[in-house]
Image: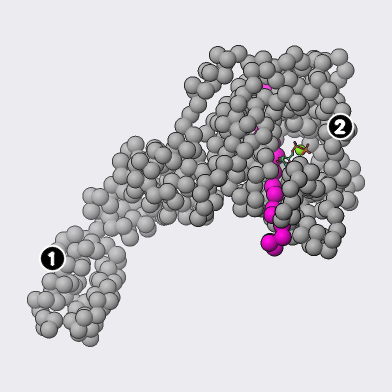
Amino acid sequence: MSQDYEVIIGLEVHVELKTASKLFCGCSTEFGADPNTHTCPVCLGMPGVLPVVNGEAVRMAVRSALALNCTVHPQSKFDRKQYFYPDLPKAYQISQYDQPLAEFGWVVIRPEGQEPRKISIRRIHVEEDAGKLNHLGQRLGDATGSLVDLNRAGVPLIEIVSEPDLRSAEEARLYLIELRASLSYLDVSDLRMEEGSMRCDANVSLRPRGYQGSLEDLPRVEIKNVNSIRNVQRGIDYEVMRQEQLMSQGERIVKETRGFDDAQGRTYSQRSKEEANDYRYFPEPDLPPLILEQGFIEQIKNSMPALPDAIREDLRARGIPAKDAEVLVLDREAYEYWLEAVALYPHERTVTNWMLSDLARLVNVRGESYRRATVGPSQLVGLLKLIDSGTLSGRMAKDVLEAMFETQQSPEAIVKEKGLSQITDEGAIGEVVRSVLQANPSVVDDYLSGKEKALAFLVGQVMKATRGQAKPDLVNRLLKESIARDYRAPC
Ligand code: ADP
Ligand code: MG
Ligand code: ZN
Protein backbone atom coordinates (compact mmCIF):
# COMPACT_ATOMS: atom_id res chain seq x y z
CA MET A 1 0.00 0.00 0.00
CA SER A 2 1.44 3.32 -0.98
CA GLN A 3 1.68 6.31 1.34
CA ASP A 4 -0.86 8.22 -0.73
CA TYR A 5 -3.96 6.37 0.44
CA GLU A 6 -5.40 4.86 3.55
CA VAL A 7 -7.57 1.75 3.32
CA ILE A 8 -11.10 2.17 4.72
CA ILE A 9 -13.22 -0.89 5.40
CA GLY A 10 -16.70 -1.38 6.86
CA LEU A 11 -18.26 -4.83 7.21
CA GLU A 12 -21.88 -5.93 7.05
CA VAL A 13 -22.27 -9.33 8.67
CA HIS A 14 -25.43 -11.41 8.34
CA VAL A 15 -25.96 -14.04 10.99
CA GLU A 16 -28.68 -16.67 10.71
CA LEU A 17 -30.41 -17.19 14.04
CA LYS A 18 -30.96 -20.82 14.93
CA THR A 19 -34.57 -20.64 16.00
CA ALA A 20 -36.66 -23.75 15.43
CA SER A 21 -39.12 -21.83 13.25
CA LYS A 22 -38.95 -18.94 10.82
CA LEU A 23 -39.20 -15.23 11.63
CA PHE A 24 -42.81 -14.63 10.63
CA CYS A 25 -44.38 -18.10 10.30
CA GLY A 26 -44.23 -21.50 11.97
CA CYS A 27 -42.22 -23.27 9.24
CA SER A 28 -39.15 -25.22 10.31
CA THR A 29 -35.73 -23.70 9.71
CA GLU A 30 -34.01 -27.08 9.46
CA PHE A 31 -31.08 -27.07 7.03
CA GLY A 32 -30.86 -29.60 4.20
CA ALA A 33 -34.51 -30.66 3.86
CA ASP A 34 -36.02 -31.44 0.44
CA PRO A 35 -36.62 -28.24 -1.53
CA ASN A 36 -39.77 -26.29 -0.70
CA THR A 37 -40.92 -28.68 2.03
CA HIS A 38 -40.55 -26.06 4.76
CA THR A 39 -42.90 -23.48 3.31
CA CYS A 40 -46.36 -22.08 3.92
CA PRO A 41 -48.52 -19.27 2.52
CA VAL A 42 -46.69 -16.70 4.69
CA CYS A 43 -43.13 -17.47 3.57
CA LEU A 44 -44.31 -18.17 0.02
CA GLY A 45 -45.65 -14.64 -0.06
CA MET A 46 -49.27 -15.47 -0.82
CA PRO A 47 -51.63 -12.52 -0.82
CA GLY A 48 -53.74 -11.89 2.26
CA VAL A 49 -51.53 -13.64 4.81
CA LEU A 50 -50.27 -11.97 7.96
CA PRO A 51 -46.78 -12.25 9.48
CA VAL A 52 -46.39 -12.77 13.22
CA VAL A 53 -42.99 -12.09 14.73
CA ASN A 54 -41.13 -14.97 16.37
CA GLY A 55 -40.37 -14.05 20.00
CA GLU A 56 -37.44 -16.43 20.20
CA ALA A 57 -35.78 -14.70 17.24
CA VAL A 58 -36.19 -11.36 18.99
CA ARG A 59 -34.69 -12.80 22.17
CA MET A 60 -31.67 -14.13 20.25
CA ALA A 61 -31.22 -10.83 18.44
CA VAL A 62 -31.28 -8.94 21.74
CA ARG A 63 -28.75 -11.36 23.26
CA SER A 64 -26.47 -10.79 20.26
CA ALA A 65 -26.85 -7.02 20.46
CA LEU A 66 -26.01 -6.99 24.17
CA ALA A 67 -22.99 -9.25 23.67
CA LEU A 68 -21.73 -6.75 21.09
CA ASN A 69 -22.15 -3.85 23.53
CA CYS A 70 -25.08 -2.28 21.68
CA THR A 71 -27.86 -0.14 23.08
CA VAL A 72 -31.08 -2.08 22.55
CA HIS A 73 -33.97 0.21 21.71
CA PRO A 74 -37.20 -0.34 23.62
CA GLN A 75 -39.00 0.40 20.39
CA SER A 76 -38.02 -0.47 16.83
CA LYS A 77 -40.01 -1.18 13.71
CA PHE A 78 -40.11 -3.32 10.61
CA ASP A 79 -39.96 -1.98 7.06
CA ARG A 80 -40.39 -3.36 3.60
CA LYS A 81 -37.31 -3.30 1.39
CA GLN A 82 -38.51 -3.71 -2.18
CA TYR A 83 -36.57 -5.46 -4.88
CA PHE A 84 -37.30 -8.10 -7.41
CA TYR A 85 -35.40 -11.36 -7.50
CA PRO A 86 -36.72 -14.90 -8.01
CA ASP A 87 -35.64 -15.99 -4.52
CA LEU A 88 -37.91 -13.34 -2.96
CA PRO A 89 -41.53 -14.29 -3.63
CA LYS A 90 -43.10 -11.23 -2.01
CA ALA A 91 -40.79 -8.94 -4.01
CA TYR A 92 -39.94 -7.28 -0.72
CA GLN A 93 -37.93 -8.31 2.29
CA ILE A 94 -39.16 -7.48 5.76
CA SER A 95 -36.24 -5.73 7.41
CA GLN A 96 -35.64 -2.77 9.68
CA TYR A 97 -34.66 0.58 8.21
CA ASP A 98 -34.68 3.81 10.19
CA GLN A 99 -35.46 2.35 13.60
CA PRO A 100 -33.23 -0.71 14.04
CA LEU A 101 -33.33 -3.02 17.04
CA ALA A 102 -29.97 -1.85 18.37
CA GLU A 103 -27.18 0.67 17.78
CA PHE A 104 -23.86 1.99 19.05
CA GLY A 105 -22.01 -1.22 19.85
CA TRP A 106 -18.38 -2.21 19.50
CA VAL A 107 -15.92 -5.05 19.17
CA VAL A 108 -12.34 -4.86 20.41
CA ILE A 109 -9.63 -6.11 18.09
CA ARG A 110 -6.05 -6.83 19.12
CA PRO A 111 -3.67 -6.29 16.20
CA GLU A 112 -0.32 -7.93 16.90
CA GLY A 113 2.20 -5.56 18.42
CA GLN A 114 -0.37 -2.77 18.75
CA GLU A 115 -2.76 -1.51 21.37
CA PRO A 116 -6.23 -3.08 21.27
CA ARG A 117 -8.66 -1.02 19.20
CA LYS A 118 -12.42 -0.53 19.47
CA ILE A 119 -14.29 -1.02 16.21
CA SER A 120 -17.72 0.59 16.37
CA ILE A 121 -20.89 -1.18 15.39
CA ARG A 122 -23.33 1.21 13.79
CA ARG A 123 -26.46 -0.88 14.09
CA ILE A 124 -27.95 -4.35 14.37
CA HIS A 125 -31.30 -5.05 12.77
CA VAL A 126 -33.55 -8.04 12.37
CA GLU A 127 -34.67 -9.24 8.95
CA GLU A 128 -35.79 -12.30 7.05
CA ASP A 129 -33.60 -14.34 4.73
CA ALA A 130 -34.44 -14.91 1.07
CA GLY A 131 -34.76 -18.32 -0.61
CA LYS A 132 -32.00 -20.03 -2.52
CA LEU A 133 -31.47 -20.40 -6.25
CA ASN A 134 -29.87 -23.58 -7.48
CA HIS A 135 -28.42 -22.97 -10.90
CA LEU A 136 -28.34 -25.89 -13.31
CA GLY A 137 -24.89 -26.14 -14.82
CA GLN A 138 -21.41 -25.26 -13.72
CA ARG A 139 -21.67 -21.53 -13.52
CA LEU A 140 -24.43 -18.96 -13.58
CA GLY A 141 -23.25 -17.89 -17.03
CA ASP A 142 -23.80 -21.35 -18.58
CA ALA A 143 -26.82 -22.28 -16.51
CA THR A 144 -29.66 -23.81 -18.50
CA GLY A 145 -32.07 -22.87 -15.75
CA SER A 146 -32.41 -22.19 -12.08
CA LEU A 147 -34.46 -23.96 -9.42
CA VAL A 148 -35.98 -21.98 -6.60
CA ASP A 149 -35.90 -23.43 -3.09
CA LEU A 150 -37.84 -21.38 -0.56
CA ASN A 151 -36.95 -23.36 2.57
CA ARG A 152 -34.63 -20.55 3.60
CA ALA A 153 -37.13 -17.79 2.80
CA GLY A 154 -38.16 -16.23 6.09
CA VAL A 155 -35.36 -17.67 8.22
CA PRO A 156 -34.41 -15.00 10.81
CA LEU A 157 -31.22 -13.03 10.35
CA ILE A 158 -29.53 -10.24 12.16
CA GLU A 159 -27.41 -7.82 10.17
CA ILE A 160 -24.49 -6.32 12.06
CA VAL A 161 -23.21 -3.16 10.37
CA SER A 162 -19.83 -1.81 11.43
CA GLU A 163 -18.66 1.76 11.12
CA PRO A 164 -15.91 2.21 8.52
CA ASP A 165 -13.28 1.82 11.25
CA LEU A 166 -11.20 -1.01 9.86
CA ARG A 167 -7.91 -0.17 8.15
CA SER A 168 -6.61 -3.43 6.69
CA ALA A 169 -7.61 -6.93 5.61
CA GLU A 170 -5.93 -8.21 8.76
CA GLU A 171 -8.08 -5.93 10.93
CA ALA A 172 -11.16 -7.19 9.10
CA ARG A 173 -10.10 -10.74 9.96
CA LEU A 174 -9.59 -9.85 13.62
CA TYR A 175 -12.99 -8.16 13.74
CA LEU A 176 -14.71 -11.20 12.24
CA ILE A 177 -13.09 -13.74 14.54
CA GLU A 178 -13.81 -11.61 17.60
CA LEU A 179 -17.42 -11.04 16.58
CA ARG A 180 -17.88 -14.73 15.82
CA ALA A 181 -16.31 -15.72 19.15
CA SER A 182 -18.60 -13.39 21.09
CA LEU A 183 -21.70 -14.76 19.40
CA SER A 184 -20.51 -18.35 19.70
CA TYR A 185 -21.01 -18.31 23.48
CA LEU A 186 -24.68 -17.32 23.09
CA ASP A 187 -26.06 -20.35 21.23
CA VAL A 188 -27.84 -18.09 18.76
CA SER A 189 -26.31 -19.31 15.50
CA ASP A 190 -24.14 -22.00 13.92
CA LEU A 191 -21.92 -19.20 12.59
CA ARG A 192 -20.64 -21.33 9.70
CA MET A 193 -19.48 -19.23 6.82
CA GLU A 194 -19.15 -22.26 4.49
CA GLU A 195 -22.80 -23.11 5.08
CA GLY A 196 -23.99 -19.54 4.87
CA SER A 197 -25.17 -19.22 8.46
CA MET A 198 -22.70 -16.33 8.72
CA ARG A 199 -22.12 -14.13 5.65
CA CYS A 200 -20.03 -11.06 5.17
CA ASP A 201 -20.14 -8.14 2.75
CA ALA A 202 -17.02 -6.00 2.77
CA ASN A 203 -17.11 -2.32 1.83
CA VAL A 204 -13.76 -1.05 0.66
CA SER A 205 -12.53 2.38 -0.33
CA LEU A 206 -9.24 4.30 -0.37
CA ARG A 207 -8.95 7.65 1.36
CA PRO A 208 -6.38 9.94 -0.23
CA ARG A 209 -3.99 11.52 2.29
CA GLY A 210 -5.35 14.86 3.36
CA TYR A 211 -8.93 14.04 2.36
CA GLN A 212 -11.17 16.07 4.64
CA GLY A 213 -14.64 14.98 3.55
CA SER A 214 -16.94 12.40 5.09
CA LEU A 215 -16.05 8.73 4.68
CA GLU A 216 -19.60 8.13 3.49
CA ASP A 217 -18.84 10.26 0.43
CA LEU A 218 -15.84 8.25 -0.70
CA PRO A 219 -16.67 6.01 -3.64
CA ARG A 220 -16.72 2.51 -2.21
CA VAL A 221 -17.10 -1.00 -3.51
CA GLU A 222 -19.20 -3.59 -1.71
CA ILE A 223 -17.86 -7.14 -2.08
CA LYS A 224 -20.85 -9.41 -1.63
CA ASN A 225 -21.31 -12.69 0.16
CA VAL A 226 -17.83 -13.99 0.59
CA ASN A 227 -17.86 -17.48 2.08
CA SER A 228 -14.84 -17.55 4.37
CA ILE A 229 -12.78 -15.16 6.44
CA ARG A 230 -9.81 -15.99 4.27
CA ASN A 231 -11.73 -14.89 1.19
CA VAL A 232 -12.87 -11.67 2.86
CA GLN A 233 -9.18 -10.87 3.27
CA ARG A 234 -8.34 -11.89 -0.30
CA GLY A 235 -11.24 -9.85 -1.66
CA ILE A 236 -10.14 -6.77 0.29
CA ASP A 237 -6.51 -7.18 -0.78
CA TYR A 238 -7.53 -7.45 -4.41
CA GLU A 239 -9.84 -4.41 -4.18
CA VAL A 240 -7.13 -2.29 -2.55
CA MET A 241 -4.75 -3.17 -5.36
CA ARG A 242 -7.34 -2.56 -8.08
CA GLN A 243 -8.54 0.75 -6.67
CA GLU A 244 -5.03 2.00 -6.06
CA GLN A 245 -4.06 1.19 -9.62
CA LEU A 246 -7.09 3.01 -11.01
CA MET A 247 -6.56 6.03 -8.80
CA SER A 248 -2.87 6.28 -9.63
CA GLN A 249 -3.91 6.39 -13.29
CA GLY A 250 -6.22 9.26 -12.49
CA GLU A 251 -9.37 7.18 -12.97
CA ARG A 252 -12.45 7.34 -10.82
CA ILE A 253 -13.68 4.49 -8.65
CA VAL A 254 -17.23 3.51 -9.54
CA LYS A 255 -19.53 2.85 -6.61
CA GLU A 256 -20.65 -0.70 -7.27
CA THR A 257 -21.35 -4.17 -5.95
CA ARG A 258 -18.72 -6.76 -6.82
CA GLY A 259 -18.55 -10.52 -6.46
CA PHE A 260 -15.47 -12.50 -5.43
CA ASP A 261 -14.05 -15.19 -7.69
CA ASP A 262 -12.43 -17.72 -5.39
CA ALA A 263 -10.48 -19.54 -8.10
CA GLN A 264 -8.98 -16.38 -9.59
CA GLY A 265 -8.69 -14.45 -6.33
CA ARG A 266 -10.34 -11.44 -7.96
CA THR A 267 -13.43 -9.34 -7.55
CA TYR A 268 -15.68 -8.71 -10.55
CA SER A 269 -18.37 -6.14 -11.22
CA GLN A 270 -21.93 -7.34 -10.59
CA ARG A 271 -24.07 -4.24 -10.61
CA SER A 272 -23.94 -0.57 -9.82
CA LYS A 273 -24.77 -0.03 -6.20
CA GLU A 274 -28.38 0.55 -5.19
CA GLU A 275 -29.04 3.54 -3.01
CA ALA A 276 -31.49 3.29 -0.15
CA ASN A 277 -34.12 5.18 -2.12
CA ASP A 278 -34.01 2.53 -4.86
CA TYR A 279 -35.51 0.13 -2.35
CA ARG A 280 -38.54 2.32 -1.60
CA TYR A 281 -38.45 1.41 2.07
CA PHE A 282 -41.72 1.95 3.90
CA PRO A 283 -43.08 0.79 7.25
CA GLU A 284 -44.42 -2.78 7.20
CA PRO A 285 -48.15 -2.25 7.57
CA ASP A 286 -48.86 -5.81 8.73
CA LEU A 287 -46.63 -5.66 11.81
CA PRO A 288 -46.94 -3.44 14.85
CA PRO A 289 -43.82 -1.69 16.17
CA LEU A 290 -41.52 -4.02 18.09
CA ILE A 291 -41.84 -2.95 21.71
CA LEU A 292 -39.44 -4.49 24.23
CA GLU A 293 -40.25 -4.08 27.89
CA GLN A 294 -37.35 -3.05 30.10
CA GLY A 295 -37.87 -6.19 32.20
CA PHE A 296 -37.44 -8.36 29.10
CA ILE A 297 -34.13 -6.68 28.21
CA GLU A 298 -32.95 -6.81 31.83
CA GLN A 299 -33.76 -10.47 32.10
CA ILE A 300 -31.66 -11.19 29.02
CA LYS A 301 -28.83 -9.03 30.39
CA ASN A 302 -28.87 -11.02 33.61
CA SER A 303 -28.70 -14.36 31.84
CA MET A 304 -25.69 -13.61 29.65
CA PRO A 305 -22.97 -16.29 29.72
CA ALA A 306 -19.29 -15.47 30.20
CA LEU A 307 -18.07 -13.66 27.09
CA PRO A 308 -14.57 -13.60 25.59
CA ASP A 309 -13.20 -10.71 27.65
CA ALA A 310 -14.31 -12.25 30.93
CA ILE A 311 -12.94 -15.61 29.82
CA ARG A 312 -9.59 -14.04 28.87
CA GLU A 313 -9.40 -12.47 32.32
CA ASP A 314 -10.22 -15.78 33.99
CA LEU A 315 -7.59 -17.66 31.97
CA ARG A 316 -5.01 -15.01 32.77
CA ALA A 317 -5.78 -15.33 36.48
CA ARG A 318 -5.29 -19.08 36.18
CA GLY A 319 -1.81 -18.63 34.76
CA ILE A 320 -2.47 -19.31 31.10
CA PRO A 321 -0.20 -17.31 28.78
CA ALA A 322 -2.07 -14.76 26.67
CA LYS A 323 -1.24 -16.47 23.39
CA ASP A 324 -2.65 -19.81 24.52
CA ALA A 325 -5.66 -18.12 26.10
CA GLU A 326 -6.43 -16.52 22.73
CA VAL A 327 -6.57 -19.90 21.01
CA LEU A 328 -8.97 -21.24 23.65
CA VAL A 329 -11.24 -18.18 23.78
CA LEU A 330 -11.68 -17.94 20.03
CA ASP A 331 -12.81 -21.56 19.77
CA ARG A 332 -15.66 -22.23 22.16
CA GLU A 333 -15.37 -26.01 21.70
CA ALA A 334 -11.70 -25.92 22.63
CA TYR A 335 -12.46 -23.77 25.65
CA GLU A 336 -15.21 -26.12 26.83
CA TYR A 337 -12.92 -29.11 26.35
CA TRP A 338 -10.36 -27.29 28.47
CA LEU A 339 -12.90 -26.49 31.21
CA GLU A 340 -13.93 -30.11 31.42
CA ALA A 341 -10.34 -31.31 31.58
CA VAL A 342 -9.20 -28.88 34.28
CA ALA A 343 -12.25 -29.69 36.37
CA LEU A 344 -10.92 -33.27 36.51
CA TYR A 345 -7.26 -32.39 36.76
CA PRO A 346 -6.41 -28.97 38.10
CA HIS A 347 -3.05 -28.46 36.40
CA GLU A 348 -4.12 -25.75 33.97
CA ARG A 349 -0.79 -25.22 32.27
CA THR A 350 -0.20 -28.92 31.63
CA VAL A 351 -3.69 -29.39 30.19
CA THR A 352 -3.22 -26.33 27.98
CA ASN A 353 0.15 -27.47 26.70
CA TRP A 354 -1.11 -30.92 25.77
CA MET A 355 -4.30 -29.58 24.25
CA LEU A 356 -2.67 -26.97 22.08
CA SER A 357 0.17 -29.15 20.82
CA ASP A 358 -0.30 -32.90 20.41
CA LEU A 359 -4.06 -33.07 20.90
CA ALA A 360 -4.69 -30.12 18.57
CA ARG A 361 -2.54 -31.71 15.89
CA LEU A 362 -4.35 -35.06 16.09
CA VAL A 363 -7.80 -33.44 16.20
CA ASN A 364 -6.87 -31.39 13.13
CA VAL A 365 -5.32 -34.07 10.97
CA ARG A 366 -8.27 -36.32 11.67
CA GLY A 367 -10.75 -33.58 10.83
CA GLU A 368 -12.41 -33.92 14.22
CA SER A 369 -13.80 -31.18 16.41
CA TYR A 370 -13.09 -30.77 20.11
CA ARG A 371 -16.69 -31.47 20.99
CA ARG A 372 -16.58 -34.82 19.24
CA ALA A 373 -12.91 -35.64 19.58
CA THR A 374 -12.17 -39.39 19.79
CA VAL A 375 -10.09 -38.60 22.85
CA GLY A 376 -12.28 -36.58 25.18
CA PRO A 377 -11.25 -34.51 28.20
CA SER A 378 -11.48 -37.37 30.70
CA GLN A 379 -9.34 -39.63 28.52
CA LEU A 380 -6.73 -36.94 28.07
CA VAL A 381 -6.68 -36.49 31.83
CA GLY A 382 -6.27 -40.26 32.27
CA LEU A 383 -3.15 -40.02 30.15
CA LEU A 384 -1.75 -37.07 32.07
CA LYS A 385 -2.21 -38.96 35.32
CA LEU A 386 -0.11 -41.83 33.96
CA ILE A 387 2.71 -39.35 33.43
CA ASP A 388 2.34 -38.05 36.98
CA SER A 389 2.43 -41.54 38.44
CA GLY A 390 5.68 -42.25 36.58
CA THR A 391 4.16 -45.00 34.42
CA LEU A 392 4.79 -43.00 31.25
CA SER A 393 7.39 -40.48 30.22
CA GLY A 394 6.21 -37.46 28.28
CA ARG A 395 7.74 -38.99 25.16
CA MET A 396 5.85 -42.28 25.63
CA ALA A 397 2.64 -40.42 26.40
CA LYS A 398 2.73 -38.79 22.98
CA ASP A 399 2.74 -42.20 21.35
CA VAL A 400 0.00 -43.45 23.65
CA LEU A 401 -2.12 -40.42 22.74
CA GLU A 402 -1.80 -41.30 19.07
CA ALA A 403 -2.77 -44.86 19.83
CA MET A 404 -5.78 -43.62 21.78
CA PHE A 405 -7.01 -41.81 18.68
CA GLU A 406 -6.30 -44.84 16.49
CA THR A 407 -7.84 -47.53 18.68
CA GLN A 408 -10.33 -45.57 20.80
CA GLN A 409 -8.97 -47.40 23.83
CA SER A 410 -8.21 -45.98 27.23
CA PRO A 411 -4.60 -45.02 27.97
CA GLU A 412 -4.44 -47.73 30.65
CA ALA A 413 -5.53 -50.40 28.16
CA ILE A 414 -2.93 -49.29 25.64
CA VAL A 415 -0.17 -49.26 28.22
CA LYS A 416 -1.12 -52.77 29.25
CA GLU A 417 -1.52 -54.16 25.75
CA LYS A 418 1.77 -52.74 24.44
CA GLY A 419 3.62 -53.70 27.60
CA LEU A 420 4.57 -50.07 27.92
CA SER A 421 5.46 -48.50 31.13
CA GLN A 422 8.40 -46.56 32.09
CA ILE A 423 11.43 -48.39 33.40
CA THR A 424 12.11 -46.84 36.77
CA ASP A 425 14.21 -49.67 38.11
CA GLU A 426 17.72 -48.35 38.69
CA GLY A 427 19.29 -51.76 38.34
CA ALA A 428 17.78 -52.38 34.95
CA ILE A 429 18.67 -48.96 33.62
CA GLY A 430 22.15 -49.19 35.19
CA GLU A 431 22.90 -52.25 33.10
CA VAL A 432 21.94 -50.51 29.89
CA VAL A 433 23.96 -47.48 30.94
CA ARG A 434 27.05 -49.62 31.46
CA SER A 435 26.82 -51.24 28.06
CA VAL A 436 26.19 -47.93 26.30
CA LEU A 437 29.25 -46.44 27.99
CA GLN A 438 31.37 -49.42 27.03
CA ALA A 439 30.26 -49.19 23.43
CA ASN A 440 31.00 -45.46 23.14
CA PRO A 441 34.38 -44.74 24.75
CA SER A 442 35.16 -41.78 22.49
CA VAL A 443 31.87 -40.09 23.36
CA VAL A 444 32.66 -40.54 27.01
CA ASP A 445 36.03 -38.88 26.37
CA ASP A 446 34.26 -36.00 24.67
CA TYR A 447 32.02 -35.58 27.65
CA LEU A 448 34.93 -35.69 30.02
CA SER A 449 36.70 -33.01 28.01
CA GLY A 450 33.72 -30.74 28.56
CA LYS A 451 31.37 -31.38 25.66
CA GLU A 452 27.95 -31.29 27.28
CA LYS A 453 26.31 -32.45 24.06
CA ALA A 454 28.03 -35.79 24.37
CA LEU A 455 25.83 -36.59 27.35
CA ALA A 456 22.67 -35.99 25.34
CA PHE A 457 23.93 -38.51 22.79
CA LEU A 458 24.51 -41.09 25.49
CA VAL A 459 21.04 -40.46 26.96
CA GLY A 460 19.64 -40.96 23.47
CA GLN A 461 21.43 -44.30 23.15
CA VAL A 462 20.01 -45.53 26.45
CA MET A 463 16.51 -44.39 25.46
CA LYS A 464 16.88 -46.18 22.16
CA ALA A 465 18.01 -49.38 23.82
CA THR A 466 15.03 -49.27 26.16
CA ARG A 467 12.57 -48.35 23.37
CA GLY A 468 11.99 -45.00 24.99
CA GLN A 469 10.82 -46.53 28.20
CA ALA A 470 13.59 -45.56 30.59
CA LYS A 471 12.76 -42.67 32.87
CA PRO A 472 14.77 -39.81 31.35
CA ASP A 473 15.89 -38.04 34.52
CA LEU A 474 17.01 -41.36 35.95
CA VAL A 475 19.06 -42.11 32.84
CA ASN A 476 20.72 -38.75 33.15
CA ARG A 477 21.64 -39.24 36.73
CA LEU A 478 22.90 -42.82 36.30
CA LEU A 479 25.04 -41.86 33.32
CA LYS A 480 26.73 -39.07 35.23
CA GLU A 481 27.23 -41.23 38.30
CA SER A 482 28.61 -44.10 36.33
CA ILE A 483 31.05 -41.91 34.39
CA ALA A 484 32.24 -40.23 37.58
CA ARG A 485 32.73 -43.60 39.24
CA ASP A 486 34.12 -45.80 36.48
CA TYR A 487 35.92 -43.36 34.20
CA ARG A 488 38.61 -40.81 34.62
CA ALA A 489 37.21 -37.82 36.45
CA PRO A 490 37.23 -34.59 34.41
CA CYS A 491 40.37 -32.58 35.08
P1 ADP B 1 -25.64 0.02 2.08
O1 ADP B 1 -27.09 -0.22 2.12
O2 ADP B 1 -25.17 1.03 1.12
O3 ADP B 1 -24.86 -1.24 2.04
P2 ADP B 1 -25.28 0.14 4.84
O4 ADP B 1 -25.64 1.25 5.77
O5 ADP B 1 -26.00 -1.15 4.90
O6 ADP B 1 -25.31 0.76 3.43
O7 ADP B 1 -23.76 -0.19 5.02
C1 ADP B 1 -22.79 0.70 4.77
C2 ADP B 1 -21.46 0.04 5.14
O8 ADP B 1 -20.44 0.71 4.43
C3 ADP B 1 -21.13 0.17 6.60
O9 ADP B 1 -20.58 -1.02 7.07
C4 ADP B 1 -20.11 1.29 6.62
O10 ADP B 1 -19.19 1.15 7.67
C5 ADP B 1 -19.42 1.09 5.31
N1 ADP B 1 -18.78 2.30 4.79
C6 ADP B 1 -19.21 3.56 4.82
N2 ADP B 1 -18.32 4.38 4.24
C7 ADP B 1 -17.30 3.61 3.83
C8 ADP B 1 -16.08 3.86 3.16
N3 ADP B 1 -15.71 5.08 2.77
N4 ADP B 1 -15.28 2.82 2.88
C9 ADP B 1 -15.62 1.58 3.25
N5 ADP B 1 -16.75 1.28 3.89
C10 ADP B 1 -17.59 2.28 4.17
MG1 MG C 1 -25.60 -3.07 2.65
ZN1 ZN D 1 -43.74 -20.51 6.31
Q: Which residue is mark 2?
A: 277
Q: Amino acid at mark 2?
A: Asn
Q: Which residue is mark 1?
A: 427
| Most foreground residue, 328 or 425 | 328
Residue at horizontal 83 percent and vertical 63 percent from the top: 249
Question: Which of the 4 image quarters holds residue 133?
Answer: top right
Determine whether, in the image, residue 241 is placed left or right of residue 438.
Answer: right
Residue 19 on the magenta span: yes
Q: Are marks 2 and 1 in contact (CB under 8 Å)?
A: no
Q: Position of residue 260 (x, y in %)?
A: 76, 51
Q: Position of residue 339 (x, y in %)?
A: 40, 38
For the residues marked 2 and 1, what is the alpha-carbon distance in whole angstroms? Answer: 88 Å
- Mark nearer the N terminus (2 vs 1): 2
Q: Residues within 10 Å of mark 1 (few under 14, many from 20)?
A: few
| Most foreground residue, 477 or 188 | 188
Magenta segment range? 1-22
Ligand 2's image quarter is top right
Residue 280 can be seen in this image: yes
In the picture as drawn, the residue positioned furthest to the left comes out as: 485
Quadrant holding the N terminus: bottom right
Q: Amino acid at mark 1?
A: Gly
Residue at horizontal 12 percent and vertical 84 percent from the top: 491
Q: Position of residue 408 (x, y in %)?
A: 42, 47
